[in-house]
Image (cartoon, grey):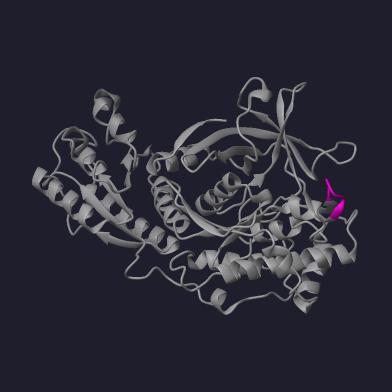
């Protein structure tokens, strides 16, 4: 989704890199760079404010003096690791827009640990990054005391910091709510960066509001524990706003960009493309007026009543390719799923209607909205064909051609406190016709259940890449239950 409507009162929502992705996303997937509709708010991406910082405390744990016996070994250079890791963490923080505060010196004694825990409880940073530099820090219970401090804790246990001889002192900590404890040989600290990314994602989600247009009432709800805000608006708001959108140069440019970027155009006419582009600019206007960073609506109701000339499928694709959520059918679970995917992975997922393929034992996901930036917001797009919305045969939908053999994560927020997870691999794309159903139609071999009819959920995301471990880690840190799809 395009981030044209970011308001200056949404402090800290985007990093500089994400702002650049936004501007790149203003052009369609093929890289066209026609006129865009930048608002003044989008031109200035606000940083976190002093009263609402995106801040992380960093602490190193180690005994005083030179090591003698015990892991990681007398030969190991804790000072060298601390210097190298600090440099990496500082770069990660710069990339992610995180404000760091390092403890002035390593701590170890029980009184030092207690004082640190008291301090972070009082200051309430967004997270604590802990580097134990000796196995004694697990054995003494120092790491676990910090992990129980009530602040999300990222604990990096590099190779040599513990072994299963005292797993009973480490594993319970690693499994605590609010803790991400990667035990890893990756001394490039990729897991630490991901831990910091989780903190950034949670901060952003809690400052994101999505407009959901359905029914006739206006209301607002915070979806806890996820933290996303949903602003419910009357469904009439969209057709009323759409009537105010003129056939401007920006609208014409968007229509022409998609016609040029597509592998081919099957059903849509030029008028269909113009109407689809007007939907996009109507969406931007509503989000801007309501202080929202995403949108969803009862689109099938509007189409069924012929209140809009074309469904919003192309509009949602364009929004997703710019990094913001355009979500089908006013489905709040799908909105939450897409927002978490975008914030945590910097890529959109594909919200789909799941169809069990009982003869192959596989799962087909089909819908008429699919992002093209499936590899990532700053990565090359997948090829696409312009089709009509299948159920109505109106307007413009994007049929995205998925890469055969691609690993895929399946994820859905089933309410704000439960996450369904699975994974699979793309087997084939289905054409409509001969198949019925929606335009982007992807068949995947799943890791279960054995009978695809037993698959849980609806409107799950298909996401490029194996991200199950990452979603599980996020769920544990932020108090969300996870189970297999």
Q: Position of residue 112 (x, y in %)?
A: 12, 49
Q: Position of residue 219 (x, y in %)?
A: 53, 58
For image coordinates 63% across by 28% down, the residue present is 455
In the image, residue 206 above or below residue 415: below
Q: Nearer the viewer, residue 78 or 149?
A: 149
Is residue 232 covered in magenta? no
| Extreme-front residue of the structure | 216
For image coordinates 26% across by 52% down, the residue present is 82
In the image, residue 132 above or below residue 298: above
Residue 45: in sight, yes or no? yes
For image coordinates 78% across by 56% down, the residue present is 311
Q: Nearer the viewer, residue 196 or 121?
A: 121
Q: Position of residue 48 (x, y in %)?
A: 39, 68
Q: Position of residue 90 (x, y in %)?
A: 35, 61
Is residue 390 covered in magenta? yes
Magenta span of residues: 389-394
Left or right: residue 436 versus residue 216 is right
Residue 378: in sight, yes or no? no
In the image, residue 420 above or below residue 81: above
User: What type of secondary structure mainly makes up the magenta span?
Assistant: loop
For image coordinates 75% across by 58% down, the residue present is 314
Q: Where's the N terminus, which quadrant?
A: bottom right
Q: Quadrant of residue 57?
A: bottom left
How many discs mark residues in the rendered view?
0
Left or right: residue 383 versus residue 57 is right
Q: Where's the C terminus, which quadrant?
A: top right
């Amino acid at each position: 989704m395009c981030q044209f409507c970011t308001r200056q009162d949404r402090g800290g929502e985007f990093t500089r890199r994400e702002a650049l992705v936004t501007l790149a996303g203003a052009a369609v997937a093929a890289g066209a760079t026609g006129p865009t509709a930048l608002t003044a708010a989008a031109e200035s991406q606000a940083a976190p404010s002093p009263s609402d910082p995106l801040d992380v405390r960093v602490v190193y744990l180690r005994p005083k003096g030179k090591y003698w016996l015990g892991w990681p070994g007398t030969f190991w250079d804790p000072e060298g690791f601390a210097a190298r890791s600090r440099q990496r963490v500082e770069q990660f923080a710069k990339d992610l827009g995180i404000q760091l505060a390092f403890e002035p010196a390593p701590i170890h004694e029980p009184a030092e640990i207690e004082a640190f825990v008291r301090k972070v409880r009082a200051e309430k940073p967004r997270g604590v990054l802990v580097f134990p530099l000796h196995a004694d820090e697990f054995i003494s219970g120092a790491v676990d005391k910090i992990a129980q401090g009530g602040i999300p804790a990222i604990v990096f246990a590099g190779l040599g910091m513990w072994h299963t001889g005292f797993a009973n002192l480490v594993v319970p900590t690693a499994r605590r709510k609010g803790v991400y404890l990667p035990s890893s040989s990756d001394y490039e600290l990729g897991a630490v960066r991901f831990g910091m990314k989780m903190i950034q994602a949670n901060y952003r989600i809690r400052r994101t509001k999505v407009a959901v247009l359905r029914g006739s009432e206006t209301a607002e709800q915070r979806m806890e524990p996820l933290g996303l805000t949903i602003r419910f608006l009357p469904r009439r708001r969209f057709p009323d706003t759409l009537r105010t959108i003129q056939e401007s140069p920006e609208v014409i440019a968007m229509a022409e960009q998609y016609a040029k970027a597509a592998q081919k155009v099957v059903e849509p006419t030029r008028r269909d493309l113009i109407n689809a582009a007007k939907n996009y600019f109507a969406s931007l206007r509503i989000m801007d007026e309501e202080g929202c960073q995403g949108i969803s609506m009862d689109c099938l109701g509007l189409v069924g009543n012929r209140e809009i000339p074309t469904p919003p499928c192309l509009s949602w694709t364009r929004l997703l390719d710019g990094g913001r959520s355009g979500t089908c059918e006013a489905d709040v679970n799908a909105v939450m799923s897409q927002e978490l995917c975008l914030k945590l992975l910097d890529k959109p997922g594909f919200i789909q209607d799941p169809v069990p393929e009982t003869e192959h034992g596989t799962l087909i996901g089909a819908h008429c909205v699919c992002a093209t930036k499936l590899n990532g917001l700053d990565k090359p797009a997948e090829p696409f064909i312009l089709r009509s919305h299948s159920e109505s045969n109106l307007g413009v939908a994007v049929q995205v051609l998925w890469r055969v053999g691609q690993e895929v994560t399946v994820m859905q927020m089933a309410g704000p406190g439960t996450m369904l997870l699975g994974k699979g691999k793309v087997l084939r794309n289905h054409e409509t016709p001969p198949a019925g159903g929606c335009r982007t139609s992807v068949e995947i071999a799943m890791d279960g259940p054995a009978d695809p009819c037993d698959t849980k959920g609806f409107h799950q995301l298909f996401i490029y890449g194996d991200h199950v471990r990452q979603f599980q880690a996020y769920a544990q840190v932020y108090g969300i239950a996870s189970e297999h799809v």
